[in-house]
Image (cartoon, rainbow, N blue to C red):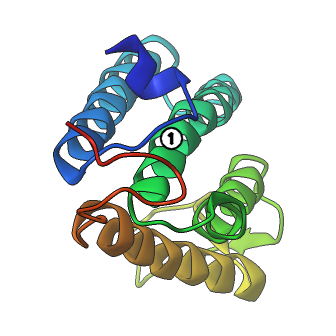
C-alpha cells in the first residue's frame, strides 16, 4: 500500500488509482477540518493549507505517473499540465495575489471579502479544466491490456 503513494515505478489500474485518490482526498478533508477548527480563517490556515498542497503533490504525482504508465503515456508533459495550474492557483489564492475587495451588496453588511482578479479567475478555470482532463484520463479511460513499454499490466 505504501508503494502506491511513494513509488513512481510500475503500472496501476483504475481501481488502485481511485483508492489512492480517495486516500489523499480523505486526508485533505480531515486536515482542512482540523486546521480550520484550530486556526479559523487566518493567515496561518492559508499557509498550512499551502504546505499540505505541496506535500500532496508527491503522492499525487506518483499515482498519476503509474496510471499514465498503464496507459503507455509518458508522464512528464501530462504532470505539468495536470498539476501546474492548480499549484499556481493555490499560491495566488493563499497570498491573495491580484485579489480585489468585493463591493458591498445592497446593505448585506459583508465587508472585507476579497475576490480574485481576471488572472486568478482565468487560472482557476484552467485548473478546473486540467483537473477534469486528469480525472478522465487517469480515472476513467482504460489502460493497456498487454505489456507496454512501462512493463506488464497490473495484476
Q: Image quarter for residue 131?
A: bottom left
- The answer to whether 104 appears left or right of 13 in the picture is right
> 107 or 117, which lies in front?
117
Q: Does 46 sit above or below residue 138? A: above
Taking the image as drawn, is residue 15 in sight? yes
Q: Secondary structure at mark 1?
A: helix
Q: Residue at x 42, y 78 (%)?
A: 133
The quadrant of the picture occupied by the C terminus is top left
Residue 93, given in percent of the width and then of the height, sits at 68, 56
Residue drawn at x 68%, y 62% is 89
Q: Report the residue at 72% width, 81% height from top.
A: 117
Q: Which residue is mark 1?
A: 60
Please identify the quarter of the rendering in which residue 83 is found. Answer: bottom right
Residue 29 occupies quadrant: top left
Q: Nearer the viewer, residue 55 or 36?
A: 55
Identified at 44% across, 60% down, the residue is 148
The N terminus lies in which quarter of the figure?
A: top left
| Residue 11 placement (x, y as % from top left) | 40, 44
Residue 70 in percent (x, y) is at: 39, 56
Other-residue count near label 1 (Cα within 10 Å), few / some / many at <14 / 14–19 / ≥20: some
Q: In this picture, is 23 found above or below 134?
A: above
From this viewpoint, which residue is outermost toward the right?
A: 97
Q: Position of residue 130 (x, y in %)?
A: 52, 75
Amino acid at each position: 500500500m505504501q508503494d502506491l503513494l511513494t513509488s513512481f515505478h510500475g503500472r496501476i489500474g483504475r481501481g488502485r488509482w481511485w483508492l489512492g485518490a480517495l486516500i489523499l482526498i480523505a486526508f485533505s478533508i480531515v486536515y482542512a477540518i482540523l486546521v480550520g477548527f484550530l486556526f479559523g480563517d487566518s493567515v496561518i490556515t492559508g499557509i498550512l493549507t499551502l504546505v499540505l498542497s505541496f506535500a500532496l503533490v508527491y503522492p499525487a504525482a506518483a499515482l498519476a505517473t503509474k496510471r499514465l504508465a498503464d496507459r503507455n503515456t509518458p508522464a512528464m508533459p501530462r504532470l505539468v499540465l495536470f498539476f501546474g495550474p492548480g499549484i499556481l492557483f493555490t499560491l495566488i489564492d493563499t497570498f491573495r495575489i491580484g485579489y480585489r475587495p468585493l463591493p458591498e451588496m445592497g446593505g448585506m453588511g459583508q465587508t472585507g471579502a476579497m475576490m480574485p482578479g481576471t488572472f486568478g479567475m482565468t487560472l482557476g478555470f484552467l485548473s478546473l479544466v486540467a483537473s477534469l482532463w486528469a480525472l478522465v484520463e487517469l480515472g476513467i479511460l482504460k489502460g493497456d491490456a498487454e505489456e507496454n513499454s512501462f512493463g506488464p499490466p497490473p495484476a
